[in-house]
Amino acid sequence: MKKVQLRFYGPLRDFLSEEHLTGNLPGQSKFFIYKFQGRQTTRDIIEAQRVPHTAVDLILIRGKPVDLSYLVQSGEYLSIYPAWRNFELSPEDKLIPVLPAETKFVLDAHLGKLASYLRMLGFDTLYRNDFDDPELASLASETPRILLTRDRGLLMRRQVKLAYFVRSDYPAVQLEEVLERFELLERIPEIRRCPVCNRALEKVSKQEILDRLEPLTKKYYQKFSRCPDCNKIYWQGSHYKQLEELLQKIEKKIKFISK
């Protein structure tokens, strides 16, 4: 029987069982022993603890970075790190891929409201409540898109490279998690998208849609957009203002945490 020591840092501890965390003080990352037989890679060992490989950005053994295919030897000590904003790594040492130039998402069935928020901010976001796991994994790897999910097993599919496990049950907090994790406050697109069907909105003159507007909307709003797919009309009403206020709160909180 082979034995190794493992230590998980930061948010990776969210995935560990109570047995792993027993005896730890808040904020600590106590090591524990893992026993195995045969040949196992770092990925095999990490995911045996139910920690998705997609959440791991750095693995150190004897102070040197190794990748997910490294064959672990008995007696080794693995230090396992998440993606941290203030943790500078060279590109060759990072395990999580660099974000593509255009940030795009695909979301599982549990994240419908988050999908609407991301679309309203302008991010290309695929969402259906009937996506199955193989379809989500394929969309994430082939497009490529960042997979957002509350399904740990989906994050451990081999083809998934860039993904995030959403912790909160509350959509506003979920949005904060995603914007903070991928540092998106400076990458919010200028063009908004339809929260229903994800198409980029097009500007439309008020005169062109006047017959579709309610009296108070006609009176108080002058700028409008239209979805070229579903033909819905949008303006900067209460939903837009609520999202802008939420975004301001998130920005202040993220800046405070980053100090």
Image (cartoon, grey):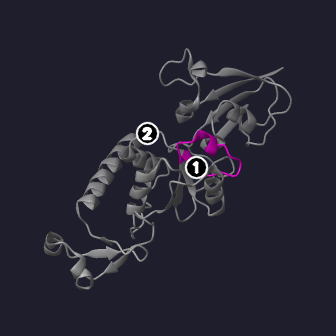
Quarter placement of the N terminus: top right
Residue at x-position 56% and y-position 30%: 13
Verify CB contact (< 8 Å) between mark 1 and mark 2.
no
Nearer to the camera, 207 or 17: 207
Q: CA distance from mark 1 to mark 2?
A: 16 Å
Please give the range of residues in magenta: 149-164
**Where in the figure is residue 84, as x and y percent of width and height?**
53, 42
**Where in the figure is residue 80, as x and y percent of width and height?**
64, 34
Which quarter of the figure has residue 214? bottom left
**Amino acid type shown at disc 2:** Ser
Residue at x-position 14% and y-position 70%: 216
Secondary element at image label 2? loop
**Amino acid type shown at disc 1:** Ala
Residue 235 sits above or below residue 7 on the image:
below
Crowding around mark 2 (Cα neighbors within 10 Å: few <14, some 14 to 19, many 20+) is few
Which quarter of the figure has residue 31? top right
Task: Please give the count of numbered marks on the rendered protein.
Answer: 2
Residue at x-position 30% and y-position 52%: 248
Q: Which residue is mark 1?
A: 163
**Where in the figure is residue 181, as x and y percent of width and height?**
49, 47
Q: Which residue is mark 2?
A: 168
